[in-house]
Amino acid sequence: MKRRLSFRLLCHAAGLLSWLLPTPFTSAESFQFALLAKRIDHRFFIQAGEGCAEAAQAQGDTCLLLGTQGPEHFRQQNQALEQALTRDLDGIALSVTHSKWLATHALQRVGKTPLITFESDLEPAEQHLRQGYVGLDNLAFGRQLAMLIQRFRPEGGRLCILTGSPRDPNHQERIRGIRQQLRGIQSTNEGVGRLNGQNGWSEPNRCPLYRAENPEKAVLQLAALLHAGPVDAIISTGSWPIYEAQAYRQHLGPLLAKLATKGVSPAIVIATNEPDAAHRALLDDGLVQAYLSLEGREIGRQSYRMMKRLALGLPIPEKIIVDSHIHLPKTRSEAPAEP
């Protein structure tokens, strides 16, 4: 079952109430914008591109989805960004792979092209290079992932986090939020170290599992983890393990069933984009305990609107935060509260 958290757009600037009003943009000329993704063959970025393109088309503009295919890499993204900056674009929204590298390379040549970030922001030291951000509050998103795990393992236990590159700003923020929530820390500047018994939670030495950007590798990593020894909880900060729902079911289903007969199956919570029927079936069959999803299309739409305002010389909020949604099995009727 899905409990929808109240959708909100947080505008971190005063006097921008008009941003929230559904009034059309007024412009006689057509604009061309682009989303520069970490990879263009991932469902989240495909959906974000669709949302941006649909919103742009409604206003007589265009929005392109640019980037490379395959596992994300900051050098490849840097090259794609350099190529995008040679095009006559009226704005670029960038999902950041490696903040410092991009800041000292392609972002030095942004010039007058309006630049915002989406889904994955620049690190604080480099945020002066962009004009706004659209996406999740990744720290709060990490806390929500941890709250879901606390629901299934209130006594704590051995936690393993599956994540992408250690350089990805958004996934590092999510990990920090997970650890802060499980530690019971409220400060946003604390709780970045590994869990080592706080509130009953610990992380095995082999965790976190990094480099899960390849879906096949992510599934194999989880299978190897479960074969190596018992863990009580698994959090994936991205959707890689379930990118192909059937592959997840085929490789992990029998192993999870065997662990369940011994009473040692882990609680699994996965961050994902909007799940389809095959992904929901994994929930209902007990192969995943919960999803925390983000609205790729809405992030794409809001990215277009921010870029359009910049192109028209209108003020923008520094950040537009799009809420996440909790998905639970049909048999469950409650969802944890927001942090």
Image (cartoon, rainbow, N blue to C red):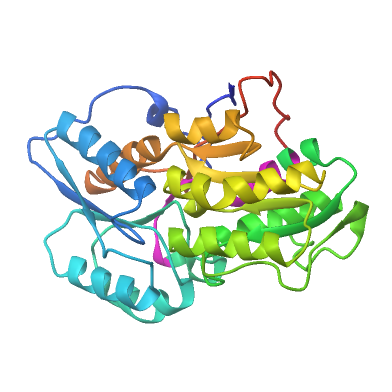
Q: Which residue is drawn at 34% across and 49% down?
A: 45
Q: Nearer the viewer, residue 163 or 250?
A: 250
- Residue 200 in picture, x, y percent from top left: 91, 53
Is residue 93 depicted above or below 308 in this figure? below
Q: Residue at x 54, y 63 (%)?
A: 220
Farthest left residue in view:
29
- Residue 217 in picture, x, y percent from top left: 48, 65
- Residue 184 in picture, x, y percent from top left: 86, 49
Q: Which of 70 and 49 is in front in this view?
A: 70
Q: Nearer the viewer, residue 315 or 88?
A: 88
Q: Nearer the viewer, residue 164 or 58?
A: 164
- Residue 268 in picture, x, y percent from top left: 67, 45
* Observer able to see residue 326: no
Magenta span contains residue 137: yes
Horizontal relation, residue 76 to residue 256: left or right: left
- Of the 4 image quadrants, the one containing the N terminus is top right
Horizontal relation, residue 324 to residue 89: left or right: right
Q: Which residue is drawn at 49% across and 37% down?
A: 322
Magenta span contains residue 247: no
Q: Which residue is drawn at 35% across and 36% down?
A: 297
Q: What stretch is highlighted in magenta?
A: 129-147
Horizontal relation, residue 90 to residue 172: left or right: left
* Observer able to see residue 34: yes
Q: In which quarter of the image is residue 195?
A: bottom right
- Of the 4 image quadrants, the one containing the C terminus is top right
